[in-house]
C-alpha cells in the first residue's frame, strides 16, 4: 500500500454509527501517533444519509466526486440487516454496485464491517471468496449467496484484496490488524491504548505476541519503557538507562514494571528478543549467528538457551515447523 492512504467509508441508508466510528477512530489516531497519514473520506450515493440510530449524516462526498487510487481502502460499515433482508436497500445497493467494482478493478482494497458484508455480497464482490459477518447473518448469507464461503468464529477475514469483519466492534480489530501490517505492533499498541481497547487477534494468527501482551495496564512510564525495549531489540540497556526512559529510579522501575506487567524486565527483554528472532527465522538466508547479533544476543548458543527458557522449544524445531507449513501450503496449491 502507498505511504499516504485514503480510507473511504461508503455509507448506505440505515448505516450503524458504531460500525462507522470505531474503524474511523483507529485510522484517525494512527495519523496522530504513527508515521503514516490517513485521509478519512465519507462518501455515499447522495450527499446525506440517515443512520439507523436517527442521526443525519450530511456534507458527504458523492461517489461521482470520490477520487481513489491503487492501494487506498474503501470500507462499507454495517447497515440494519432486517431492512436489507426485506429488500429496502436494493435501490441503494444498485446505485453503489458499479462503483465498488470499478474501484476494486482500479486496485483499491475493499472491506466491510459487520453486516456491511451483505452489501458486498449483493454487489457480487464476494463471489468465490471467503468472508465473515455478524453471527446472526451467517446462515442467511450461506443460503442467499452460495458462491460465497462464509466463515464463523472469525473476527475478520482477508481474501483477494477484500477485508470482512464480524460483529460491530470487530471492525476495530480488523482496522488495528491492517494498521499493524502497515506500521508495526508498536504504533498499533499506542493506538489501542489511546482508544482504551484490548487487542484481539484473528484465530488464524498466533494468539500471543510480546508486542501486544502485557499492555493492558495504565502506567505511562512503564509503557514508555516497554516501547523502548520493543523498538531496540538489538540493544541491552541497563536498568539505569531504562529508568531514564521512564523518568524512574531503578528501584521504582523494577517494582512498577513487575506490578504492571507481571514480569521482570529481563523476562520481558528476553521475550522481545525471542519474538524478533522468530520473525527473522522466516528468512532462510540468515544464519542463526546473524539472527543472534540482530537480536542483541552474544552468540547463537546464547539465543538457543534463551529461546528454550522462554518457549520450551528450540529455534531448530521452529524452523522445521515453518518448512512443514510451507510444504503443506505448496501441496494444497498444487
Image (cartoon, rainbow, N blue to C red):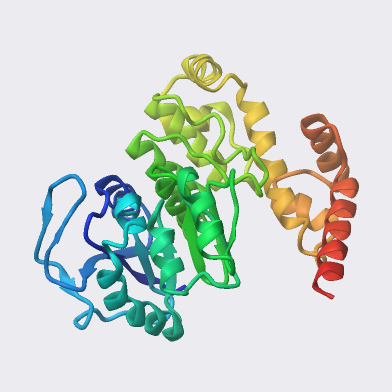
Query: How far across and how far down the image is residue 62, in percent?
Result: 18, 75
> 266 or 211, which is in the foreground?
211
Judge whether 29 appears above or below 245 on screen: below
From this viewpoint, is residue 32 visible?
A: no
The part of the image, by quadrant, that contains residue 48 is bottom left
Judge whether 334 appears above or below 39 on screen: below
Judge whether 108 appears above or below 172 on screen: below
- What's the residue at 42%, 69% (across, down)? 122
Judge whether 8 appears above or below 305 on screen: below
- What's the residue at 54%, 23% (across, down)? 261
Query: How far across and how far down the image is residue 181, in percent?
Result: 53, 59
Which quarter of the rendering shows the C terminus?
Answer: bottom right
Task: In the displayed orientation, state which residue is furthest to the front.
Answer: 86
- What's the residue at 54%, 29% (across, down)? 214
Q: Describe residue 80's horizontal placement relative to residue 61 as left or right.
A: right
Q: Describe residue 57's horizontal placement relative to residue 157 as left or right.
A: left
The part of the image, by quadrant, that contains residue 267 is top right
Query: How far across and how far down the image is residue 232, in percent?
Result: 57, 46
Amino acid at each position: 500500500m502507498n505511504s499516504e492512504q485514503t480510507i473511504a467509508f461508503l455509507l448506505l441508508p440505515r448505516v450503524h454509527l458504531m460500525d462507522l466510528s470505531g474503524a474511523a477512530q483507529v485510522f484517525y489516531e494512527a495519523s496522530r501517533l504513527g508515521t503514516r497519514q490517513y485521509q478519512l473520506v465519507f462518501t455515499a450515493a447522495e450527499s446525506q444519509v440517515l443512520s439507523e440510530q436517527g442521526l443525519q449524516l450530511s456534507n458527504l462526498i458523492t461517489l461521482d466526486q470520490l477520487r481513489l487510487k491503487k492501494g487506498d481502502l474503501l470500507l462499507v460499515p454495517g447497515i440494519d440487516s432486517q431492512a436489507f433482508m426485506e429488500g429496502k436497500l436494493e435501490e441503494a445497493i444498485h446505485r453503489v454496485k458499479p462503483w465498488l467494482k470499478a474501484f476494486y478493478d482500479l486496485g483499491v482494497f475493499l472491506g466491510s464491517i459487520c453486516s456491511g458484508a451483505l452489501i458486498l455480497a449483493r454487489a457480487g464482490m464476494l463471489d468465490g471468496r471467503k468472508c465473515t459477518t455478524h453471527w446472526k447473518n451467517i446462515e442467511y448469507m450461506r443460503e442467499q449467496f452460495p458462491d460465497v464461503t462464509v466463515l464463523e468464529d472469525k473476527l475478520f477475514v482477508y481474501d483477494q484484496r477484500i477485508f470482512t469483519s464480524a460483529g460491530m466492534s470487530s471492525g476495530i480489530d480488523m482496522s488495528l490488524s491492517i494498521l499493524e501490517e502497515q506500521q508495526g505492533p508498536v504504533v498499533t499498541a499506542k493506538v489501542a491504548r489511546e482508544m482504551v481497547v484490548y487487542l484481539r487477534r484473528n484465530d488464524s494468527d498466533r494468539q500471543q505476541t510480546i508486542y501486544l501482551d502485557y499492555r493492558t495496564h495504565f502506567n505511562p512510564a512503564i509503557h514508555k519503557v516497554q516501547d523502548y525495549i520493543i523498538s531496540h531489540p538489538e540493544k541491552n540497556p541497563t536498568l539505569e538507562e531504562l529508568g531514564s526512559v521512564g523518568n524512574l529510579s531503578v528501584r521504582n522501575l523494577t517494582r512498577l514494571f513487575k506490578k504492571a506487567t507481571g514480569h521482570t524486565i529481563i523476562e520481558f527483554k528476553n521475550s522481545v528478543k525471542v519474538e524478533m528472532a522468530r520473525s527473522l527465522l522466516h528468512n532462510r538466508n540468515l544464519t542463526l549467528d546473524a539472527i543472534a547479533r540482530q537480536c542483541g544476543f552474544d552468540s547463537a548458543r546464547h539465543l538457543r538457551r534463551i529461546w528454550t527458557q522462554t518457549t520450551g522449544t528450540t529455534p531448530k524445531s521452529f524452523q522445521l515447523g515453518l518448512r512443514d507449513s510451507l510444504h503443506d501450503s505448496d501441496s494444497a496449491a498444487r
